[in-house]
Image (spheres, helix red, strand yellow):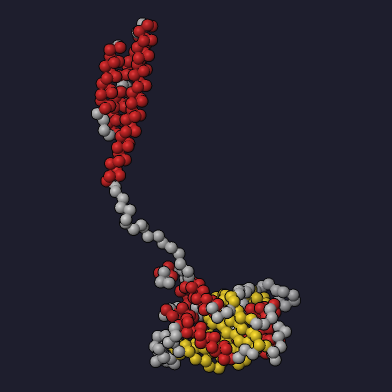
Amino acid sequence: METQLQSLREDALASLEAITNMESLNEWRVQYLGRKSSLNQILRSLKELPPDERQKNGALANQIKNLLKNKLQEKTGQIEELTLKDSLKQQTLDVTLPGKPIDIGRLHPLTQTIREICNIFGSMGFETIEGPEIEQDYYNFEALNIPEDHPARDMFATMWTDYRVGDDPNNLLLRTHTSPMQIRIMEKRRPPIRVIVPGRVYRYEASDATHESMFHQIEGLAVSENITLAELKGTLFEFASRLFGSNRKARFRCDYFPFVEPGVEMAIECIVCNGAGCSLCHNTGWIEILGGGMVHPNVLKRVGYDPAVYSGFAFGMGIERIPMLKYGIEDIRLFCGNDMRFLRQF
């Protein structure tokens, strides 16, 4: 039996040396170390031998079995290493090639427009301030020279809330414009004041291509001594020049807003027809972009400013209207539609 074990050992090692792949290695393992292998059959037959031979051959058989297991483990490592090297040779990596493109986020077109407008006015000395979207009737209307019985309230389709302050059941609302911050700022500060106020505003009206119940505005306010309409005009003309281009013409015309006197509207030369007249500008050659005027003396009195000493100007514009004009967007609802085909263009 000793001769048989030594022969089995030599055959197994010689066969193992010639193996070069995992499939053949697994066949070798079954042949020499499996349950039905010759080595296991010898181990099971040891009980039939005399005690002296059983001990001697049993020790040799276990020694050979442990040797073959160790050699199997070594061979497995060698074949795995060779397989990896062959795989790397076949799958070469060119580090000079560009990497896979990564999708990155981008700012919403309204956010881009708000930041652009804030940067323009910021360079002219205006501070950016935000205000509450749920507002009191006093700040939204009354303090802005729009008392309860004033016909100008019909200009604002107001969304009232169920909350209230004090005894008035209808004195909290979703602000209809950003102008209430004029009062809040002037209550807390003394002139000189130069601020702009971007934010959401709300109107109770049907949604269509040019109207939404929620949209964005930017309010501007400047108060100091001896401020004139000429300074308002110069400020807004400079703003229009930077936003729409220095070659774009702009004009002022009289308009009415209850919290300014006199009131004006500002229009720019039509971006589509360059003043020749088209459907966008209703064949006028001009497109209105904002309204403004000199702060009404009644508004100044509300916050304790003496109109004989201080004067100021205010203006406001709808944010959505700016990119709609610049990029030819025909439906305001696209800004809140979350359609990536639309948003990726900006």
Q: Picture coordinates of residue 252 (x, y %)?
A: 52, 92
Residue 323: image x %, image y %?
46, 78
In the depicted structure, whether residue 31 falls above or below residue 166: above
Q: Position of residue 164 (x, y in %)?
A: 70, 74
Instruction: Give the quarter of the image for residue 34.
Output: top left
* 62 relative to 111, above or below: above
Q: Quadrant of residue 262?
A: bottom right
In this rendering, position of residue 47 left or right of residue 160: left
In the shown orientation, is residue 297 left or right of residue 109? right
Give the mark count: 0
Where's residue 24, x and y in %? Answer: 27, 31
- Say if residue 203 shows up in the picture: no
The foreground one among 166 and 79 is 79
Q: In what quadrant of the picture does the C terminus appear?
A: bottom left
The answer to which of 129 and 180 lies nearer the viewer is 129
- Residue extending furthest toward the right: 167
Q: In the image, is 104 to the left or to the right of 194?
A: left
Give the residue at x 30% y 11%.
1
Lateral position of residue 335 relative to residue 126, left or right: left
Which of the 4 quarters of the picture holds residue 63? top left
- Residue at x 28% of width, y 14% of height: 4
What residue is rendered at 38% in x and 10% in y?
A: 55
Q: Residue at x 64, y 84 (%)?
A: 223
Kindly tell me whether residue 73 is visible in this rendering.
Answer: yes
